[in-house]
Amino acid sequence: MTLSVQGWHLDETAAQLTLQVTTTRTRVRCPLCHTLTRRVHSRYARTLVDLPWGPYTVHLHLRVRKFFCDQPMCPCQIFTERVPTVAAPWARRTLRLAQRLRACGLALGGETGARLGHRLGLPTSPDTLLRLVQTAPALDTPAPHILGVDEWAWRRGQRYGTILVNLETHRVLDLLPERSADMVAQWLAQHPTVTVVCRDRSALYADGMRRGTPHVVQVVDRFHLVKNLREAIEAFLHDQRPALQAAAACTAQVLTQVAGPVAAPTMYRGRHRCFQAGQRRQEAAQQHRHTAWVTTYEAIHTLRAQGTSVTAIAAQLGISRPTVYAYLRRTRPPSPRSPQRSGQVLRPYMAYLVQRWREGCTDSMQRWREMRALGYAYSSRTVSRFLTRLRRARAAGWAPETQTSPYTRPQGPSARAVSFTWVCPEAKRAQDAQLYVDQLTQAHPPIAQAYTLSQAFLALVRERRGDALATWITEARASAIAALARFAEGLQEDLAAITTGLTLPWSNGVVEGHVNRLKLLKRQSYGRAGVGLLRQRLMQAV
Ligand SMILES: [Zn+2]
């Protein structure tokens, strides 16, 4: 409506279409005093790049005018006419082109966005895209009431920032460059509509919230509570290795009674990979890691003996505080771990091997050749290891089917794996997992006590019975399970916020999701993006 095409020129060699355009309005308003005027002072040309037309880039040669302002008191004597629906006052490209480029930049960042732009016929430089992203106008967002706060890592163990999410709309509200009480306090003071804040268990955020807005209801996120409980269980189970191992044998015993008819084999044609080279690489990497663990273990224990604080040790060694605590809980350096033999490559063929075993075919090389014909692409050692397990199971009087379960491994499942089984709801556990837990708790009263206590806590979390928390804490502290007593003492320190966490429906699952997205964006820009760019991309991404 405001522009009129006067002529055009098509340059085939440069693939460029140039349109001569003028503005059509006869009377124009002064941008300062808004008086209408028609007195032209002069004319000049602006060149704007527009959206492409097929393979042609489109340039607008825009003739614009300068006007006199007729209002004698106006400080703006001469002004240029604006075309607000077409381009910003000083811009070299039209609004609609800038919008598309900005969308590319928000979705993909500078480099990748510029490459995509080039493919779409919107050539631009990475720097221009980043500038467009940085200057993107703020979105109109409703005032937040329920806030989720969590930390995110600039560099794991070294530098952290803070992410703030509106838990009602599930949108990111802000990204703070630091994890500090002051910053959170300041942010909350600027946003007085917030009434409930959901956070992790760090005392730091709790302090910031108390100072920023004392009336805000603090809620401890249930995800972090369950996570801390699981860690306590794992620490407890670390010392129960003989029991974990014994329960594996008992589970095999029980599974022998319930082992039904042999299942039909499931066929899987695996990818061909050079197994041995991979394994050698894995072993070398493992050896390297183990040396590093021992060095770290010795450094931490030496520093601690000298009276250095955990925070200072973490900063000095460039590791996180939870890792320092984990090392301090150990009384001797970690032992070398054998390379991961997860049995995953064998899993699809286990039923077949068990069936052949029942038919009396127990020669491992022969079985390996048969499996290769079925598509198995890994070493014969893996097969022979499994057949050794079957041989031992036969000697112990167990059904060969029992050996397909990870809970019957001769060395027993890891404390970590069992701790995850414990916090998994009973209804979701596999049959062998449940049998294993039953065996473990039946034979060892302290483990049974720890199990009952942890299940009672999980019930509080799942059924949101915050009122029963105080009773649970008393019970756990009185128990002989040191790890759970420590966990309960920790709860005591933040009791009010945890009780509301176990009562109100809010939780930080959404925030964890956004932190994951943030990690992706961070890596997409190869770790070079600053907080401003990350904030824009997180908040405005399409
Ligand atoms: Zn004026």
Image (tube, grey):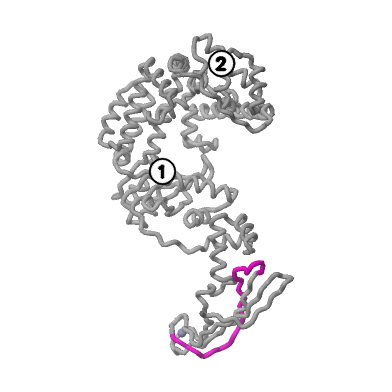
Residue 341 is situated, as x and y percent measured from the top left of the image, at 58, 24
Q: What residue sits right under mark 1 in the picture?
A: 509
Q: Which mark is residue 367?
A: none
- Relative to 42, say whether 141 is above or below: above
User: Which amino acid type is shown beneath numbered disc 1?
Assistant: Gly
What residue is shown at x 52% (from left), y 80% (from top)?
2
Label 1, residues with CA under 10 Å away: few <14, some 14-19, many ≥20? some
- Relative to 127, say whether 183 is above or below: above
The front one of 47 and 238 is 47
Q: What residue sits right under mark 2 in the picture?
A: 389
Q: Please report contact status of discs 1 and 2: CB closer than 8 Å, yes or no.
A: no
Residue 296 is situated, as x and y percent measured from the top left of the image, at 56, 29
Q: Is residue 92 visible?
A: yes
The front one of 284 and 169 is 169
- Relative to 266, say whether 169 is above or below: below
User: Which amino acid type is shown beneath numbered disc 2?
Assistant: Arg
Q: Secondary structure at mark 1?
A: helix
- Quick one: label 1 or label 2, which is nearer the N terminus? 2
Residue 148 is situated, as x and y percent measured from the top left of the image, at 39, 48
Residue 258 is situated, as x and y percent measured from the top left of the image, at 43, 17
Boundaries of the magenta span: 35-56
Instruction: Say if the magenta span includes residue 280.
Output: no
Instruction: Say if the magenta span includes residue 39.
Output: yes
State left or right for residue 478 relative to residue 343: left
